[in-house]
Amino acid sequence: MQHPQKDKRAAPAKGSGLLQPLQSNLAHFSCFHYRKPAPTGPVDKASSTTLLSFANPISDNALPLDEEMTFREVKPVIPYFLLLFVAVPTIAEDLRLVTWNIESGGNKPSVIADQLSKLGPYDIVGLTEVDPANSRRYKQAMGDTYRSVLSSTGNKDRLMLLYDESKIQLIENYELVAHNGKRMNTVDFRYRSPLVGRYQHRQSGTEFLVVVVHLARGKEKIRQMQAEGMRTWAASQTVPVIAIGDFNFDYVFETEKGNKGFDVFLAGDTWKWVRPEKLVDTNWYDPEPDGVDNYPGSCLDFTFVAGAAKKWAAQSRVIERPGDFPDDDTTSDHRPVELLIEFGQPVPATTSTE
Ligand SMILES: [Ca+2]
Ligand SMILES: [Ca+2]
Ligand SMILES: [Ca+2]
């Protein structure tokens, strides 16, 4: 099933005076890959900034810092009776991840920032549809220990990885343009190149890759091309891989089928879907609007694991918050999806199949 939803990839950049000249140079920087020379010891703020600047010339650090714009994490007081309805994880939570499409252009950034501050705590947060003008605000909403990487592609629908630096160390980050001849973006960079962070869990020393994606919406063939590229790339990695984000796979609960991109992505058993125990619709779509979601019971947002990560215990859950749907002009039209990981025994690195 194909939602007749418009693909926002080609939205013209109407950024501020500061962003305008940078955005015109997107293509020149999209392939840049910075590798941190010595991934040992804690990352200080200065080195994180250097890394972001290298890898992402249009990172949030490139934006002017508004000293008056300070956001403090608000700890909500949860009545005890509500705790009864909170799902209790049955695995050790060595790693807590969440992904969320925050609907750039269809939200109020202050509302999203407030909701982000109440979402956690998560070790790694993968956002899609981030307007770069708001990325710093979102990072501040997560708390002082978070660092972030913003993708260079996607105009106002960027990808963003946030991580809690007190628990996770970033070793390197890069965007996936192509792998072994399989492209994940077009030569004119009109789509969103998947954004990869290579991380090390400080306490256990476990190393892994997290890739946040927002595959093409309107162009089915482009989405399939990206799905094949992701599969090819993941199959040749030598450390555990986790993929989170908005895959636009249109998985329908009733038929248990997704679109062709879903089949291409899962072919050959490279990726394993961490399927939520309870399937919950992740996207509100009501263009008429008549107050009824046109595609109830389907899913666009997923969490997957590949390589040695398939041996880890993992649990996924679609996060439902009171009043989240129907969507309005201040909120996102997507629900966040959580992934909890329990690291297994250390798995020796396998030989690359490249
Ligand atoms: Ca909205
Ligand atoms: Ca409707
Ligand atoms: Ca829906």
Image: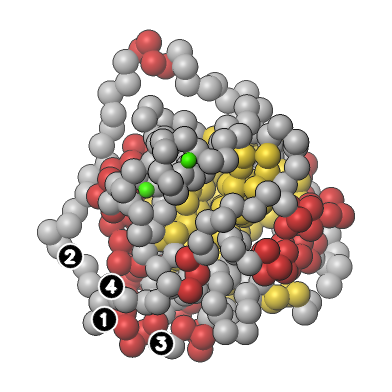
| Residue 248 visible in the current orientation | yes
Instruction: Examine the rendered structure and indicate whether residue 181 appears above or below residue 119.
Output: below
Percent across and percent down for residue 318 are 54, 35
Q: Residue at x 43, y 46 (%)?
A: 288
Q: Which residue is mark 3?
A: 24
Is 84 left, or right, of 221 in this rendering? Answer: left
Dot 3 or dot 1: first in sequence order is: 1
| Mark 1 surroundings within 10 Å by alpha-carbon count, few (fewer than 14), some (14 through 19), many (20 or more) | few
Identify which residue, 19 or 255, lies in the foreground. 255
| Mark 3 surroundings within 10 Å by alpha-carbon count, few (fewer than 14), some (14 through 19), many (20 or more) | few
Q: CA distance from mark 2 to mark 3?
A: 24 Å
Is 347 left, or right, of 67 in this rendering? Answer: right
Front of the two marks 3 and 1:
3
Circles 3 and 1 in contact, beta carbons < 8 Å = no
Residue type beneath disc 1: Leu
Q: CA distance from mark 1 to mark 4?
A: 8 Å
Q: Which mark is residue 18?
A: 1
Q: Which residue is mark 4?
A: 63
Q: Which mark is residue 66?
A: 2
Dot 2 or dot 3: first in sequence order is: 3
Dot 3 or dot 4: first in sequence order is: 3
Dot 2 or dot 1: first in sequence order is: 1
Element class at badge 4: loop
Circles 1 and 4 in contact, beta carbons < 8 Å = yes
